[in-house]
Amino acid sequence: MSTLDSARTSASGAAGSRPTEVKGLKLLKSPEEGGTKKEYQDFLDKLENHVTMAWDEGGDIGQVVASGELPDIEEPEDITDEEEKSKLKQRMWILKVDAFVARDTALKNNVKALYALITNNISKIAKSKIQSKMG
């Protein structure tokens, strides 16, 4: 690994508990710098594989890399008055709500970490082009 690669992959440290070093990830360049569609797709594939396998709730953030869209995390339905009378049903519902909140929080944190990971692994010209786009 070159010094530049080492600096890029460790620049953001371990974003939270997420490993940020992606083995074999090459600096992404814009077409004007000689970057190709194949290199872009390889970049996305490596990122998707890395975040899916190495990050908590990686499947959700892997979907973001693959599709460019946030996954639809289904919110637990409220329990009925009848179910509320059962301590077991209440506890099961609380666990479902806790799992939903944890998954939603992980996704939000992973999106921020993904942004940092991507911006640390793209050329200055590509970064400038991305930051100049509205939306």
Image (cartoon, grey):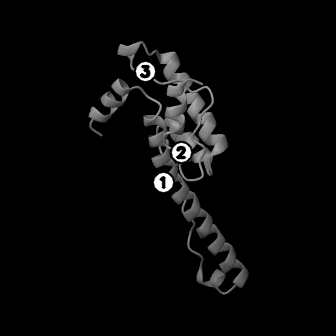
- Tell me what residue is drawn at x 60 percent, y 33 percent: 22
Tell me the number on the disc at residue 68.
none
Secondary structure of the residue carrying numbered label 3: loop
* Closer to the camera in the image, 127 or 5: 5
> How far is mark 1 from mark 3, CA to CA?
27 Å
Q: Residues within 10 Å of mark 1 (few under 14, many from 20)?
A: some
Secondary structure of the residue carrying numbered label 1: helix
> How far is mark 2 from mark 1, CA to CA?
18 Å
Residue 87, position as x, y percentages in the image: 70, 84
Q: Residues within 10 Å of mark 3 (few under 14, many from 20)?
A: some
- Tell me what residue is drawn at x 52 percent, y 59 percent: 105
The residue at which mark 3 appears reads as 29
* Closer to the camera in the image, 17 or 99: 17
Whether tag 2 and tag 1 are in contact, CB under 8 A, the answer is no
Secondary structure of the residue carrying numbered label 2: loop
- Location of residue 96 (image quadrant): bottom right
Q: Nearer the viewer, mark 3 or mark 2?
A: 2
Please state, as top left, top right, bottom left or bottom right, where the N terminus lies in the image: top right
The residue at which mark 2 appears reads as 13
Q: Nearer the viewer, mark 2 or mark 1?
A: 2
Camera sees residue 92: yes
Does 98 appear above or below 40? below
Q: Which residue type carries mark 3?
A: Lys
The residue at which mark 1 appears reads as 108
Q: Which residue type carries mark 2?
A: Gly
Please state, as top left, top right, bottom left or bottom right, where the C terminus lies in the image: top left
> How far is mark 3 from mark 2, CA to CA?
22 Å
